[in-house]
Image: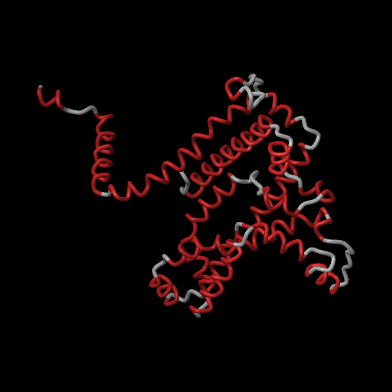
Amino acid sequence: MKIALHRKPKGVSSQYRTTLTFKKDMQRNWTLYLLFLPILLHVIIFKYVPMYGTIIAFKDFRPNLGIWGSPWVGFKHFIKFFNEPIFDRLLQNTLRLSVFGFIFGLPFPILFAILLHEIPFKKLKNTVQTISIFPHFVSTVVVCGIIRTFCASDGLFNTILNSLGIHLGKPLLQIPEAFAPIFIGSNIWAAVGWGSLIYIAAIGGVDPEVYDAAAIDGAGRLQKIWYIMLPSIKPVFTLQLIMSVGGLLNVGSEKILLLYNETIYSKADVISTYLYRKGLIDMSFSYSAAIDLLNAVIAFILTLIANSICRKVNDISLF
């Protein structure tokens, strides 16, 4: 009877063991936890604490009254955004840039990583990789300045088009239909080198003996890529895919604001640029908070859907 009294319930035992393991790990690796503490505090202070301010999306925020003193308006700002005359245009432009950027941008780092792996000369491989990563560290302002120069009437792109017999007679950034290719292409150019690093690491983790065994079995270069390299990066690709789907509506406003002008508003104006105008120029804090909250909720739902699909299809997911 005494033994029975001292037994722990089955539902508590696993939790008890987990807690005990965590305490032992903390005692053994307390220095690592101490190094992690500033990161944890940064996330809490700058990511979670500001979430308190999202309540102004449901209020008519007035700085003199404060968050709690401002009148409650419910879903007024959300309804107003859906009823905006330019809502359809904003949504179409956002989806056009994000979806096409997603479709064309996702494969390029994989292809580049495979091509780098296939270069037999180590010095050449390192040089190409270093050059490809460099655009990631260049300021967005500088990149947009280069793009504007290349897209000018007498710029590089117009010079090439003129040599091919295509005479536009004006800068490419004044042609609405040309904005999407310029924006997506420049994003791919800036991100392909940096984005390929994680795939290079995944490919480099494959045991060289696997390639040797495949070569003995008669596998050619393409067969090695298809049956060895691509399966090795499948988990990484799945995680990147899930996170990319979650950010479909988050088209970077900084680059668009530096590139667009009144002549291409019809194709370049997106939700994030509209949010910038309403929040920082018109000072409509509650309205802009409602739009941003709506974007976050949609991104969360898309992430859940993508995560669920990936987990069912190939048993790989974020959570």
Depth check, front residue: 275 or 180 = 275
Q: Residue at x 33, y 47 (%)?
A: 34
**Whole-percent x and y of residue 192?**
59, 62
Q: Write down the quadrant of residue 68 in the picture.
A: top right
Q: Write down the quadrant of residue 55 in the picture.
A: top right
Q: Residue at x 58, y 71 (%)?
A: 131
Vertical position of residue 281 compared to residue 58: above or below: below
Q: Write down the quadrant of residue 278 in the picture.
A: top right
Q: Residue furthest front?
A: 64
**Whole-percent x and y of residue 163?**
84, 74
Q: Is residue 65 left or right of residue 38?
A: right
State the scheme by which the image is colored.
secondary structure
- Looking at the figure, which quarter contains the C terminus? top left
Q: Residue at x 77, y 55 (%)?
A: 179
Depth check, front residue: 65 or 242 = 65
Q: Is residue 317 left or right of residue 85?
A: left
**Whole-percent x and y of residue 119?**
53, 76
Q: Residue furthest left?
A: 2
Q: Count numbered badges in the picture.
A: 0
Q: Residue at x 66, y 20 (%)?
A: 73
Vertical position of residue 229 compared to residue 22: above or below: below
**Whole-percent x and y of residue 62?**
66, 25
- Looking at the figure, which quarter contains the N terminus? top left
